[in-house]
Image (tube, rainbow, N blue to C red):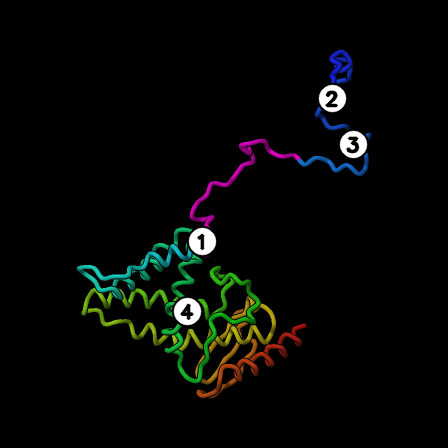
Amino acid sequence: MVVVDEKAQAMLPPPPPYSSPSPAVRPSFVPLPVPVHPPPFSAPRARPSLATFPPHLLLHIVHRTFPQAPDKDYGKLERQRKTLYWLSTSLRLVNRAFYIACMHVLRSTYLPSYTSLIRSPYTSDPFPLTSDAPVDTCTPSARSRETAVLDLFIALKVRDDVWADDTELHLGQPEAFRDLFDLSQPRARLEDLLRARLDGDLRGYSVTFAPRRVGVIGPSRRTVAEVERTRDEALEVAAKRLARRLREYLAAKG
């Protein structure tokens, strides 16, 4: 049995206060306390919104906007084409996050159709791995030249499909697609190949393309390099010779 001496207990000094001693007298082996916000944690938090959603969740939301069944006026495919048109003309304009998600869906949907229209002997690669641009291909300055052509094709195609569903009087726009794949696509592809060979940006320079001749226009708006080509010559071959001619010009320029 333990006998507690109440008088002796009353004479003991009180415990030390909870305040931390100054760093000057603190032993070197004792870590400084880390400040912690008391409950309910007064640290400011960003208010959640669609713009702060993780990309994979936002992409899932965009996918869920596609109808999976027909209605009384339109079949399933017609309703899905209208949804693609809505993504292109409305939803992607909400903010940057929706733009990235919508363009991911639109590009993956229309890339096979775009590739099938490439004219021989031209080649296509809208997302070149050798591009000196950042990974974000949704920013205009970060896209390859052919990515911009693909986006233009999508803008034409979604509208053409919906109009064809709405009325039999719509005859399509064959001349628009013809110009796209006879001139814009091979010229953009040639410029991407030239940028990859020069391992740098051609800012201030632009590429000219014709069935028999390709060239580069400099900042002074005059042709600084030009080579001839045959109609059946691959763009890779023309880009190699044009890059050699442009290097000679830049070396002479100093």
Tell me the number on the disc at residue 15: 2
Residue mark closest to the camera, 3 vs 4? 3
Residue type, label 3: Pro
Assess whether residue 81 is covered by the magenta stretch: no
Tell me where residue 139 appears, x and y as whole percent.
Answer: 48, 59
Residue mark closest to the camera, 2 vs 1? 2
Residue type, label 1: Ala
CA distance separating discs 3 and 2: 21 Å
Tell me where residue 121 appears, x and y as whole percent.
Answer: 44, 84
Res. 135 visible in picture? yes
Nearer-N-terminus badge (2/1): 2
Residue mark closest to the camera, 3 vs 2? 2
CA distance separating discs 3 and 4: 64 Å
Nearer-N-terminus badge (3/4): 3
Q: Which residue is mark 1?
A: 97
Q: Residues within 10 Å of mark 2 (few under 14, many from 20)?
A: few
At numbered mark 4, what does the secondary structure look like: helix, strand or loop?
helix
Residue placed at 63% from the left, 79% from the top? 248
Tell me where residue 175 appears, x and y as whole percent.
Answer: 31, 74
> In which quadrant is the N terminus drawn?
top right
Tell me the number on the disc at residue 150: 4
Residue type, label 2: Pro
Q: Is residue 199 or residue 87 the one in the foreground? A: 87
Q: Residues within 10 Å of mark 1 (few under 14, many from 20)?
A: some
Nearer-N-terminus badge (3/2): 2
At numbered mark 1, what does the secondary structure look like: helix, strand or loop?
helix
At numbered mark 2, what does the secondary structure look like: helix, strand or loop?
loop
Q: Is residue 253 or residue 32 the one in the foreground? A: 32
Nearer-N-terminus badge (4/1): 1
